[in-house]
Image (cartoon, grey):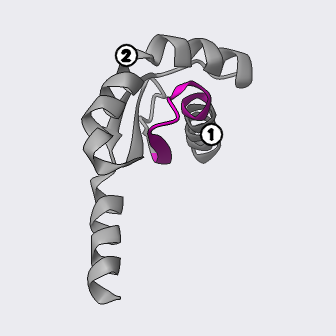
Amino acid sequence: MHEKNVEALRGAAAEFLSREAGRQTLITVTRAELSDNRRTGIIFITVFPDTAEQEAVQFANRNRGELGKFFEKRVRGMRMPHVEFVIDEGDKHRRRLDELTN
């Protein structure tokens, strides 16, 4: 059940950001984590171009209230947790390693 809730959060955040973010920046939700009590979560994102990372995280965190409304409409039976958007540094490091090995 926990994984289903995590996937619901990740999917809703991805759909919300794809609709609301500007077309100059590509924001991708890579994964999400949810606390055991389902009250707090972290949504990991990557941003292209890299120079827009800080603005993208600020945009996403500033629009958490709108995400909550979107989430409540999309996901039945689960309350929207308090979330924070952060850059997925692990994915960033993986991409850098791919560049170095290719």
Task: Name the mark on residue 62.
Answer: 2
**Neighbourhood count class around disc 1 (C-alpha, 10 Å): few under 14, some 14–19, many 20 upward:** some
Q: Residue at x 41, y 26 (%)?
A: 60
Q: Position of residue 44 (x, y in %)?
A: 40, 44
| Residue 96, quarter of picture | bottom left
Q: Amino acid at mark 1?
A: Gly
Q: Is residue 76 visible?
A: no
Q: Position of residue 81 (x, y in %)?
A: 48, 22
**Which of the pair 38/29 is nearer the observer?**
29
In the picture of the structure, the residue carrying the numbered disc 1 is 11
**Residue 75 vertical placement versus 26 (above, below):** above
Q: Residue at x 72, y 16 (%)?
A: 73
**Residue 49 vertical placement versus 60 (above, below):** below
Disc 2 is placed on an element classified as helix
**Neighbourhood count class around disc 2 (C-alpha, 10 Å): few under 14, some 14–19, many 20 upward:** few
Q: Is residue 90 visible?
A: yes
Q: Is residue 101 left or right of residue 16?
A: left
Q: How many marks?
A: 2
**Which of the pair 48/81 is nearer the observer?**
48
Q: Residue at x 32, y 38 (%)?
A: 86
Q: Which residues are magenta?
A: 16-31
Sequence-wise first label, 1 or 2: 1
Is 22 included in the stretch rendered in magenta?
Answer: yes
Tag in front: 1 or 2: 2
